[in-house]
């Protein structure tokens, strides 16, 4: 089956968004997982709950919250728009995908870090290794299988994300058409229709419902 130029563009952008989301979120994910495993501090349970919020909140709500905070006139986004232009761009799709996939990566890497024998780290410290060397030569290599598993899982989740991206980024053909957003076309009446022409969802009604629910 031959794909059209539009479909190739959608696939290319989808891979670009997913890879960007995974690469830029991976260092933060490793840090968050390490903090949850190795550190004890007040509010740790609250931090753990916040990290895992994207697993329980509807993706459309996540996208709406990103639009409020990181949009062009958002609380944070108004300061970043001139440099990054997150909302309504492929960068915004990468951010939304990273947020949705973040807790999945944390869970996988957290389990891998918990399986690391801390006695090996303590032995390295007694031999004079500093914490950074212990982390990069012992902790990180031993947890590498979990990092790979989390990365693959996050990439697959990012590739299939729809709700947060359609809310935060929308769908502009030739600009930020993102798979699976690429499977849905938005006409001039802002009604989402599938390729067969059957109505899928009234976008305005969906967003109004989200606003009312919040």
Image (cartoon, helix red, strand yellow):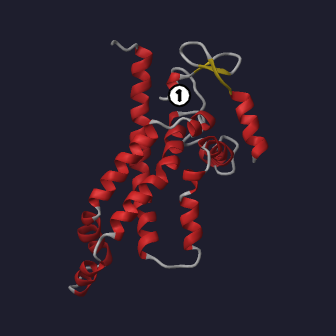
- Pointer 1: what residue? 181
Q: Residue furthest left?
A: 127
* Camera-nearest residue between 11 and 74: 11
Residue at 42 percent across and 72 percent down: it is 37
Task: Name above or below for residue 5 compared with residue 84.
Answer: above
Percent position (x, y) of residue 49? 57, 63
Compared across the picture, whether 23 is left or right of 177 comes to left
Examine the rendering and report whether any part of residue 96 can be seen.
Answer: yes
Residue at 24%, 64% in the rendered image: 141
- Location of the N terminus by quadrant is top left
Looking at the rendering, which quadrant does residue 108 occupy? Answer: bottom left
Mark 1 lies on a secondary structure that is: helix
* Res 202 quadrant in image: top right
Lateral position of residue 132 relative to residue 172, left or right = left
Q: Residue at x 63, y 36 (%)?
A: 167
Q: Is residue 202 above or below residue 118?
A: above
User: Where is residue 133 drawn, in percent x and y?
Assistant: 27, 73
Q: Nearer the viewer, residue 97 or 95?
A: 97
Total marks in image: 1
Q: Residues within 10 Å of mark 1 (few under 14, many from 20)?
A: many
| Residue 176 makes an appearance in the image | no
| Foreground residue among 185 and 17 | 185
55 vs 130, left or right, is right
User: Horizontal and vertical percent for residue 205?
Assistant: 74, 30
Image vertical order of residue 120 relative to residue 179, above or below: below
Q: Residue furthest right?
A: 212
Q: Position of residue 107 (x, y in %)?
A: 43, 59
């Amino acid at each position: 089956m031959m794909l059209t130029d539009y479909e190739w563009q959608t696939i290319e952008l989808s891979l670009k968004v997913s890879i960007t989301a995974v690469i830029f979120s991976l260092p933060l994910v490793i840090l968050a997982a390490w903090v949850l495993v190795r550190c004890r501090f007040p509010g740790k349970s609250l931090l753990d709950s916040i990290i895992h919020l994207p697993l329980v909140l509807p993706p459309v709500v996540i996208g709406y919250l990103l639009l409020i905070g990181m949009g062009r006139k958002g609380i944070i986004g108004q300061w970043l728009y001139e440099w990054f232009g997150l909302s309504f761009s492929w960068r915004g799709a990468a951010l939304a995908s990273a947020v949705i996939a973040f807790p999945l990566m944390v869970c996988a890497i957290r389990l891998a870090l918990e399986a690391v024998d801390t006695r090996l780290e303590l032995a390295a410290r007694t031999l004079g290794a500093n914490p950074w060397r212990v982390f990069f030569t012992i902790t990180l290599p031993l947890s590498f299988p979990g990092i790979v598993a989390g990365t693959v899982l996050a990439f697959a989740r990012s590739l299939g994300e729809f709700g947060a991206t359609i809310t935060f980024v929308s769908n502009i053909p030739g600009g930020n058409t993102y798979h699976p957003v690429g499977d849905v076309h938005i006409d001039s009446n802002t009604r989402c229709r599938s390729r067969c022409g059957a109505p899928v969802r009234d976008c305005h009604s969906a967003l109004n419902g989200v606003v009312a629910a919040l």
